[in-house]
Image (tube, rainbow, N blue to C red):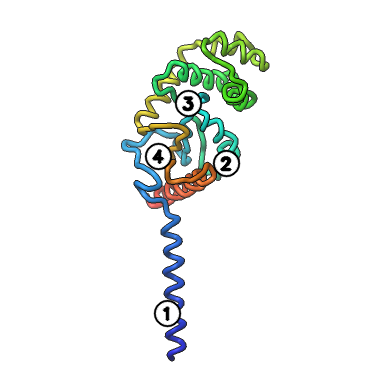
Amino acid sequence: MKKLAVLLFAGLISAFAISGLSLAAEPLAGRDYKAVNPPLATAKGKIEVIEFFSYGCPHCSDFHPLISQWAAKLPKDVSFRRAPVSFNRPEWARLSRLYFALDATGDLAKLDAAVFIAIHEQRVMFRTDEAVVSWAASKGADAKKFGDALASFSMQSKVQRADQDATAARIAGVPALVVDGKFLINNEAAGSYDELLKLADGVIAKARQERKGK
């Protein structure tokens, strides 16, 4: 009987230890994420992850290969989109228009990483729209098509919308991840980009569980 009691006690200790591990893995408000209130508008049906970024940000440049690989393996119930922000910097607003213009002309997949390389490795200066168009054309984009997209009113509207969403989510720096329009992941809770993406996985799981509970 004494031996059985010891075994039961050991089992309870083990169970509490496992429970503690589970609790530690559960994302916590304030520590791992901040609530976005009111939530951002997101696409219906799927859990949307938004990456707020700028081509002008060196950290975004370092993060880009990792989050691209991560986004390509997301579950079917999760979608991913990127939102370039300017923080009211004219030079970053031009880079935001560059992103949206590449997307509109179908050149984003081909030139997305190349923009980061141009800015942070080759020190290309995109100080004017003409410089942006010239660079894109040198990389194979249709100069007129791309130039028209870059200068269009719709590009400016998209830039403003992305900046408005960043302000609403209280984005203070980039890269920044918002899950399901409701959870702004705390970068300081992660010690590396890999840990940041693991934290994003945990917050996605939380969002999924909340949806099931509705």
How far apart, in angstroms, are the residues tagged by discs 1 and 4? 41 Å
* Residue 144 shown left or right of residue 25 in the figure: right
Q: Secondary structure at mark 3?
A: strand
How far apart, in angstroms, are the residues tagged by discs 1 and 2? 42 Å
How far apart, in angstroms, are the residues tagged by discs 2 and 4? 18 Å
Residue 186 in sight from this viewpoint: yes
Whichever of labels 2 and 4 marks the residue nearer the N terminus, that label is 2
- Residue 12, by quadrant, is bottom left
How far apart, in angstroms, are the residues tagged by discs 4 and 3? 16 Å
Whichever of labels 1 and 4 marks the residue nearer the N terminus, that label is 1
**Residue 83 drawn at (x, y percent):** 47, 28
Q: Secondary structure at mark 2?
A: helix
Whichever of labels 1 and 2 marks the residue nearer the N terminus, that label is 1
Q: Residue at x 52, y 42 (%)?
A: 193
Whichever of labels 2 and 3 marks the residue nearer the N terminus, that label is 2
- Name the amino acid, label 4: Leu
**Residue 127 drawn at (x, y percent):** 52, 12
- Name the amino acid, label 1: Phe
* Residue 22 shown left or right of residue 101 in the figure: left
How far apart, in angstroms, are the residues tagged by discs 2 and 3? 19 Å
Question: Residue tagged by mark 1?
Answer: 9
- Name the amino acid, label 3: Pro
Asked whether disc 4 touches disc 3, contact meaning CB atoms under 8 Å apart, the reply is: no
Q: Which mark is residue 70?
A: 2
**Residue 34 drawn at (x, y percent):** 36, 42
Question: Residue tagged by mark 4?
Answer: 184
